[in-house]
Image: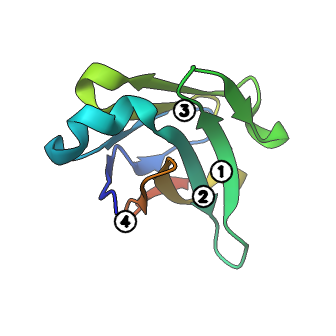
């Protein structure tokens, strides 16, 4: 199992920005470029939803509610995936989780809390 570590969450006012980071351990450096990566989120009282994903070929997909505001990217050399979040809304408040998967392995991060509130 891949053990991922997220960072960058926090409290931000509506309209603000945050950049989330997710890093894979050094032990999977040799296979990171084979991983499809994604960000999920779970808001209080709601189901976990897929927010954004990026494939090994850097094809991206986003849930409609964040299109035009969020950008997912990856840096294989740093074994990292990022989520740039702009124009944040209160409805974006959630625990954000990083996810990785390939034919050989998969894993989640523990989550990082994003709170959008004035």
Regarding mark 3 in the picture, which secondary structure is present there?
loop
User: What residue sits right under mark 3 in the picture?
Assistant: 16
User: What residue sits right under mark 4 in the picture?
Assistant: 110
Q: Pointers 2 and 1 in contact (CB under 8 A)?
A: yes
Cα–Cα span, label 2 and label 1: 9 Å
The extreme left residue here reads: 26
Cα–Cα span, label 4 and label 1: 18 Å
Residue 50, horizontal then vertical, whole percent? 68, 52
Label 2 vs label 1, nearer the camera? 2
Tell me, yes or no, if residue 118 can be seen here: no
- Label whose residue precedes the other's in the sequence (3 or 4): 3
Q: Nearer the viewer, residue 77 or 14?
A: 77
- Label whose residue precedes the other's in the sequence (4 or 1): 1
Query: Would you say 88 lies left or right of 31 here?
Result: right
Regarding mark 4 in the picture, which secondary structure is present there?
loop
Total numbered labels: 4
The extreme front residue here reads: 104
- Label whose residue precedes the other's in the sequence (4 or 2): 2
Badge 2: how crowded within 10 Å, few (<14), some, or many (20+)?
Answer: many
- Label whose residue precedes the other's in the sequence (2 or 1): 2
Please report the residue visible at 64 percent of the width from the left and 67 percent of the height from the top.
43
Please report the residue visible at 62 percent of the width from the left and 38 percent of the height from the top.
53
């Amino acid at each position: 199992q891949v053990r991922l570590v997220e960072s960058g969450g926090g409290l931000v006012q509506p309209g603000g920005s945050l950049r989330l980071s997710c890093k894979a351990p050094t032990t999977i450096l040799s296979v990171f470029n084979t991983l499809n990566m994604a960000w999920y989120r779970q808001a209080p009282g709601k189901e976990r939803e897929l927010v954004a994903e990026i494939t090994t070929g850097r094809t991206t997909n986003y849930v409609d509610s964040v299109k035009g505001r969020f950008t997912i990217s990856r840096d294989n050399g740093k074994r990292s995936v990022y989520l740039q979040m702009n124009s944040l809304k209160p409805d974006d408040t959630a625990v954000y989780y990083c996810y990785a998967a390939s034919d050989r392995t998969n894993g989640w991060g523990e989550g990082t809390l994003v709170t959008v509130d004035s």
